[in-house]
Image (cartoon, grey):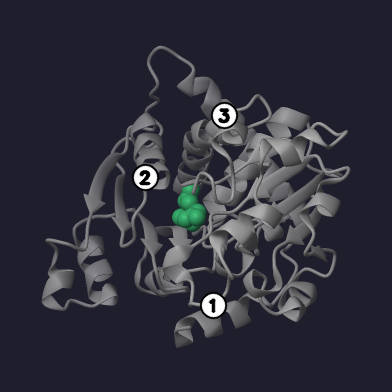
Amino acid sequence: MPATETLIDGAVARSTPPPPETVRRRHVLDLDDFSREEIGEVLDTAESMKEVLSREIKQVPALRGKNIVNMFFEESTRTRISFELAARALSANVVNFTAKGSSVEKGESLADTVRTLQALGADMIVMRHSHSGAPYMVAQHFRGSVLNAGDGRHAHPTQALLDLYTIREKLGRVEGTKVVIVGDVVHSRVARSNLWGLTRMGAKVTLCAPPTLLGPQQFWKTTWPQVNISHNLDESLEGADVVMALRLQKERQQAGLLPSLREYSRFFALTAERLEHLDNRLLVMHPGPMNEGVEIDPDVATSTQSLIEEQVTNGVAVRMALLYRLAG
Ligand code: NCD
């Protein structure tokens, strides 16, 4: 694990409660500094944005004349495209930066790149990076706003907000709902940001994973004392309202964490057979991209219980809400 990851994972453990009143924020780096009120306001704004997206002309002039740079140093389909569509729906100018073909290839540092973008007139930077903490560093060098679109295994706040939005839209509330997050928890930035968001909104969360994919229990327990930990999916799903399956992050795994994929699927995959045995009507979520047949079966992913498509759709409205609020 790179040193930066240890540092930032350590930093996550600070659970300073955010101020009760909504302060106008400049950046969205994680949900640890969002109060319950602010999350509620973002979700309400997203609802208005969803109305805009249902119109024939899906565009409002709110961010006309603002320059937004999408900087993705790691692969992405839905997050990158939904940020771009969100910015365009608000009439902003959008530029997509890719490391390939830029001066980063000539050795320019991230800090220099950011100062260059600033000199070119960027107002907001949307950033995904494989190093935990990279967007925090960028925020220190940039006078505009930074939105974290996923950093290492640390945080993915916009995904967590769209997940909260989707749960609230479907169930009418987040408070009191029972949510099981299952899979490759140790490598998951989606799990970490969702833990901040779900616990702050009053959901009851269970993390379910084999011990090797959970990492040190103490980390979860000290950071989010309310969270339940389980190694048994069938037990965890009893009485649950929502199950969120995580992608097995093969690119971040060290060898030896799993005996075999088949064995993993037998105990931890969302299969039709496993869900059939439940009395409760469970809603199924997945941030995508999915390893079909590993953590989720294709028929479950496309079943009427699945919210996976709604999650993608809601991502645009939630990102519009954040861009709009940051632009003030
Ligand atoms: C996630 C990500 O990149 O963190 N995907 C996403 O943004 N929708 C989850 C993953 O990669 O497994």
How many other residues sit within 10 Å of disc 3, few (<14), some (14-19) or many (≥20)? Answer: few
First of labels 3, 1 by sequence position: 1
Location of mark 2 (residue) = 77
Check the image and report above or below for 37 versus 185: above
Q: Residue at x 80, y 59 (%)?
A: 232
Check the image and report above or below for 190 versus 217: above
Location of mark 3 (residue) = 302
Toward which corner of the image does residue 65 lie, by quadrant?
top left
Q: Which mark is residue 28?
A: none
Horizontal side of 66 relative to 201 (left or right) equals: left
The x and y percentages for residue 146 are: 42, 59
Between 230 and 33, which is closer to the camera in this rendering? 230
How many other residues sit within 10 Å of disc 2, few (<14), some (14-19) or many (≥20)? Answer: few
Q: Amino acid at mark 1?
A: Gly
Instruction: Inspect this view and state whether residue 251 appears.
Output: yes
**Disc 3 to disc 1: CB gap under 8 Å:** no
Toward which corner of the image does residue 221 lie, by quadrant?
bottom right
Q: Residue at x 66, y 57 (%)?
A: 34
Q: Nearer the viewer, mark 3 or mark 2?
A: 3
Instruction: Inspect this view and state whether residue 202 appears.
Output: no
C-alpha separation, residue under disc 3 versus residue under disc 1: 31 Å
SS at badge 3? loop
Q: Which mark is residue 256?
A: 1
The x and y percentages for residue 214 are: 67, 70
Check the image and report above or below for 199 versus 9: above
First of labels 3, 2 by sequence position: 2
First of labels 2, 1 by sequence position: 2
